[in-house]
Image: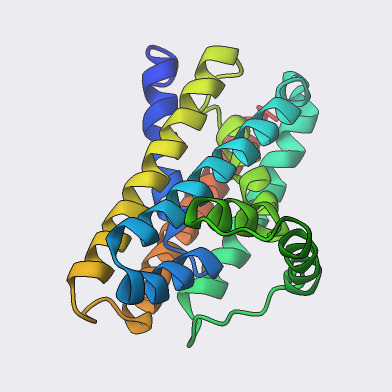
Amino acid sequence: MSADHPVLFAVLAGFLFGNAFCWLPGPINLTILNEGARRGFRWAFLIGLGAAVMDAIYCAISFTGFAQIFENDMIRAVMQVGSFVFLLLLGCKFLFASSLNVPNKLDAASGRIEAKLEEKIHPRSPFLTGFLRVAANLGVLAAWLILAATLMSEKWVDNSRMARAACVGGIFVGTVLWFFILSFTVARGHGKFSQQTLLRLQHISGLCLLTTAIFVGLEIAWRLSKHQF
């Protein structure tokens, strides 16, 4: 299907992966969880919208950086193996986590960057708050880099400008939809959407990542058996 309808497949892949990645724990989800209950739907959704815009920018940077790299079959094979290992470890990490506070080696650096940005810019609008918190989170950039590498190494996203743009668009729509649902549920749900619910979604997202890693691993094994690397 990806070969016959590359743009449509890229949009679908971006939407699904973008939406699933939003289920992972992070400052934006927790901020929406707190602000939605305190200030209402509009404030919470604008935080998510700002975060989604910055996510889309990071995605565009990631796909642009990998555009020329994946024209080399050897590099694509190496990136495919690297993506498999990363998704396997990340999936296990989130699937078996007992709390939302999963340690991240980038947290300290991200915290310093966020503090400097807020000190200089002093964001007062919810949109800018969400935008800057994602911009300062180095873990988000790393995640989108790995996602772009996975999608392109597996050829789920064709190495064409139109397909890459379509995937970024799908990711943006997927993230906006998630933040809309989260904001609405928190604002209208009267406490029904809790951190425990986020933890369950984190487990589901971890299972999705683990399933993707297994699929990638099986494809690598099949190519090795056919000597297609």
**Residue located at (31% from left, 61% from top):** 183
Determine whether, in the image, residue 167 is placed left or right of residue 63: left
Quarter in which the C terminus is drawn = top right
Name the outermost residue toward the bottom: 98
- Horizontal and vertical percent position of residue 3: 44, 15
Depth check: give the residue in front, 142 or 125: 125
Quarter holding residue 40: bottom left
Q: Residue furthest left?
A: 189
Q: Is residue 21 above or below residue 193?
A: above
Residue closer to the observer: 219 or 113: 113
Which quadrant of the figure has residue 119? bottom right
Observer-nearest residue: 181 or 153? 181
x then y, percent, for residue 218: 52, 47
Position in image of residue 225 (x %, y %): 61, 37
Q: How is the image coloured?
A: rainbow
Residue 101 % position (x, y): 56, 82
Residue that appears at 53% across and 41% down: 53
227 sits to left or right of 13: right
Residue pictured at 55% horizontal, 27% vertical: 155
